[in-house]
Structure formats: structure tokens, C-alpha cells
Image (cartoon, rainbow, N blue to C red):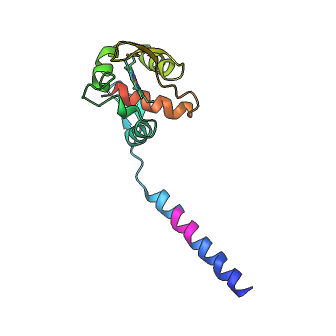
Amino acid sequence: MKRNTQLTLKVLNATLLAVVMCACAPVTVTRTASGQACRPEAAKAMAVKDHCMRCHGLTKQKEGPSFSVVAKRYRGSPTAEVDLYAHLTSHDVSMMSDENTGVHKCIAGENPEKIRNMVRWILDQ
Ligand code: HEC
């Protein structure tokens, strides 16, 4: 019984510590050039997690265009956010660098709000 109580206390302590650490972690919300709220750190983390950065750099051309080139391409387009959201959630056919067409990575299974956040971040590069 005593051991159980100690274990419970340890678990409780660890949980409390985790909660405090999460509450203190800074969540930066910025505004994109077009005035949209954006959490750049979360967007970047998602791009890394989903292996986007394997084919895209922020400014470096890789297999895919850099995000700054994409942002420039869509600047001033009122449908930019909707267009890129569709691109990332629809198995769009892409022209890959070896001139074969391939299917672009689809992240339709991700949380829509998180996808929108990443799209805003891309459009703000
Ligand atoms: C296997 C390589 C590869 C991966 C992985 C990849 N992309 Fe791409 N992406 C490309 C290529 C090549 C293009 C250019 C052809 C095109 O526009 O479809 C492209 C185009 C784009 C565009 C521009 C679309 C447009 O309409 O101009 C965006 C935005 C983009 N990718 C975002 C992403 C994101 C976000 C991820 C991660 C979820 C990702 N890509 C993963 C290769 C990749």
C-alpha cells in the first residue's frame, strides 16, 4: 500500500512538472505580411515532421521550389491560402525534377487548422 502511494505521488509529480513546462513554453503568434495570425514555430515543426523540408528549402531550391519562391508566386493572390491548402490535401500531380510526374505529398489527415497555419507560414516566406 505504501509503495503504491509513493508511486502515485511520483506519477503525480511528473504530471505536474509536464503541465507546468507546457504552460510556460512560449507560443509565439505572429502576423504574416497579409495580417493573418501565424505560429511560425509550429508551422516549421510540422514541415520538418512531414518531411516537406526534404524537397523544399526556405530560400534554397531543392527538388521542389523554395518556399520564398512559392510565396512570391502567390503574392497578391486572394485565393493563395485556399489554393495551397488544396494542393497539400489532394494528391495533386506534381512535376518532379526528373521530369516524371509524381503525386505530391498529401497531408489530408492532418488537423486543418495546423495545415492552414503552415500554409500561412509558407506564404509569408
Ligand atoms: C518528394 C519531394 C517533395 C516533398 C516531400 C514535398 N514536396 Fe512540395 N513540391 C515538390 C515539387 C517537385 C513541387 C513543384 C511541382 C508542383 O508545384 O507540384 C512542389 C510544390 C510545392 C508547393 C507549391 C505549389 C504551387 O501551387 O505552387 C508547395 C506550397 C509545397 N510543395 C509544399 C509542400 C509541403 C508543405 C510539403 C510537406 C507536407 C511538401 N511540399 C512535400 C516536391 C515535394
Please identify the residue farthest to the left as the structure is shown: 60
Is 16 in the magenta?
yes
**Nearer-the-camera pick, 44 or 22:** 44
Q: In the image, is 12 to the left or to the right of 79?
A: right
Most frequent secondary structure within the magenta stretch: helix
Q: Quadrant of residue 62?
A: top left
- The residue lying toward the viewer, choosing from 27 and 103, is 103
Quadrant where the N terminus sits is bottom right
Q: Residue furthest bottom?
A: 2
Q: Residue at x 43, y 55 (%)?
A: 25
Residue at the spot 44% in from the left edge and 59% down from the top edge: 24
Measuring 53% from the left and 23% from the top, which residue is drawn there? 89
**Does 69 sit above or below residue 16?**
above
Name the spot of residue 117 as percent of width and height, x first. Answer: 45, 32
Q: Quadrant of the C terminus?
A: top left
Picture quadrant of residue 52: top left
- Report whether 43 appears left or right of 91: left
**Magenta stretch containing residue 45, yes or no?**
no
Q: Which residues are magenta?
A: 14-18
Residue furthest to the right in view is: 1
Residue nearest the observer in this picture, 62 or 38? 62
Rendering coords of residue 81 (x, y %): 44, 20
Percent coordinates x, y for residue 100 in the rendering? 40, 13
Q: Indicate the quadrant of ligand 1 in the picture.
A: top left
